[in-house]
Image: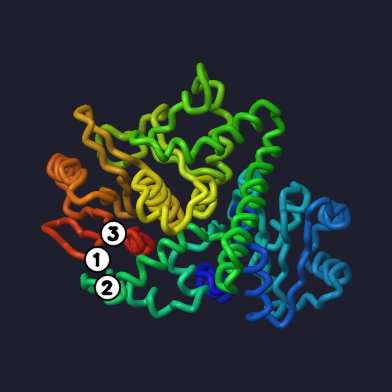
Amino acid sequence: MERKINQFLLKWKTDLIRKPLLIIGTRQVGKTYTALDFGKNNYKYVAYFNTDHNTILKDLFKKERSITRLAEALSIISEVPIVKNDTLIIFDNVTDEEIIKGIKLFGYDKNDYHVIAITSSRDSLLKFRGEEFQYKIMTEMDYEEFLWAIGEKEVAEKIRYAYDNHRSCSVHTKALDYFYEYLITGGLPEVVDAYATKKHYGYLDSIKERVFDINKSELLNSKNLIDIERGIEVMESIPKQLEKENKKFQYGVLGYGRRAKEYENSINYLVTNQLVYRSYKIRVAKSPLSSCRELDSFKLYLPDDGLLSMRYNLTKDRLKVDDDVKQALYENHIAHTLVEAGYSLYYYQSEGKAEVNFVIQNRMGKIIPIELATKQGSKVKSLSVFMKKYIVTDAYRITENNFSTKKNVRYLPIYAIFCLNEQLY
């Protein structure tokens, strides 16, 4: 399947100051498949190593510090010629410190070995810090990639055209209908592939349930039984948290008498490892937004819409009529799409209870409010108050309607959130 990361990989391959590349992301987002497919299509040889509990590799990297001899040994182990510029070397499931030190050797000086390391552990990222690596975070497929996968690239192109040219979308109804399918299916490559080959929803849910269990099992790496149990409680509570009118994370949803201090470590672990995404409350909006956040007030989101819809036992027909669930899914979709585009998440709530669902800041420091509305006329006042108070020149309001612009507010259909990646610059 075509993924957006492929363009990044092509640039990395031809980079004159190329370093070993670390691809990091949660399990089942397609990291290994993408790296292998990239190697198959762009290199003469691919040498793949699963480093999980691989004592041979660990011993090799512990003893050998010569790049030339390492390449020779890796060629023998993999039974694949390791030729400069012609072989892609892939190290998968990288967490061991000795193996990490060995991979670092390929990044100290300019050389012609092309190396990709893959990990799902954010803890491993700390060990990779330094000038010896380049980094790329990989996430689930967004709606645009979903359209590519199901053979509707033309729909994706027309959405982009409408956004870029401030026009209405000529395939709005079709795009919205496919978006409903995406919300239920989600962006996990295995699930999308099953959907594209016309598997029934029961089969898709069985895959999603397995992935949700895999994500929960990632908590085992925290090595603290209490934190593991509490982390699972937090993940399981997110559907209920988002279905509330006030979507702020509330410990009371977890059970009577639950306190923030008891769950702090678990939530931080989940956020650090991208098992959930966190949006902090701000009462004022000034640059940098990170200085305005209230650490004890936040919302949590799941990184995949399909995992959330599964917890609601959602069907397409129910999605169209259940406003509470629809609002939860729409807000979750906006959240993870913005994170995947590179934004940090914040939401605004004033003393007067005016609320803007999302406030982001691009790399130029520009503050941009994003308001979600599913009912005609709702929350327009909050967005207007925010724009007037902070002299904001650009804002977005997300609806189910077609593209339009009113004064300084661009109205985007919910399916077009992926277009906002361009606002980063």
Q: Quadrant of the N terminus?
A: bottom right
Is there CB contact under 8 Å for labels 3 and 2?
A: no
Three-letter amino acid code at disc 1? Asn
- The quarter of the displayed image where residue 189 is located: bottom right
Dots 1, 2 in contact, CB < 8 A: yes
Give x and y (percent) for residue 422. Answer: 34, 64
Residue 30 sits in quarter: bottom right
Which quadrant would the C terminus be assigned to in this image?
bottom left
Camera-nearest residue between 197 and 125: 197
Which label's residue is closer to the chain start, 3 or 2?
2
Q: Look at label 3 and name its amino acid.
A: Glu
Q: Residues within 10 Å of mark 1 (few under 14, many from 20)?
A: many
Q: Nearer the viewer, mark 3 or mark 2?
A: 3
Is residue 16 or residue 120 the one in the foreground?
120
Looking at the picture, how far across and down is residue 37, in whole percent?
65, 74
- In the rendering, at what x and y percent does residue 378 appear? 21, 45
**Horizontal side of residue 195 vs 177, given as left or right:** right
User: Tag 1, which secondary structure?
Assistant: loop
Q: Secondary structure at mark 2?
A: loop
Q: Give me the residue at 48% from left, 41% from top.
A: 239
The answer to whether residue 22 is visible is no
Q: CA distance from mark 3 to mark 2?
A: 12 Å
Classed neighbour count for the residue bearing mark 3: other residues with Cα under 10 Å, few (<14), some (14–19), many (≥20): some
Q: Residue at x 64, y 52 (%)?
A: 211
On screen, residue 295 versus residue 134, left or right, reads left
Residue 169 numbered tag:
2
- Determine the CA span between mark 3 and mark 1: 7 Å
Mark 3 lies on a secondary structure that is loop
User: Circle 3 is placed at which residue position?
Assistant: 400
Badge 2: residue crowd in 10 Å (few <14, some 14–19, many ≥20):
many
Q: Which mark is residue 402?
A: 1
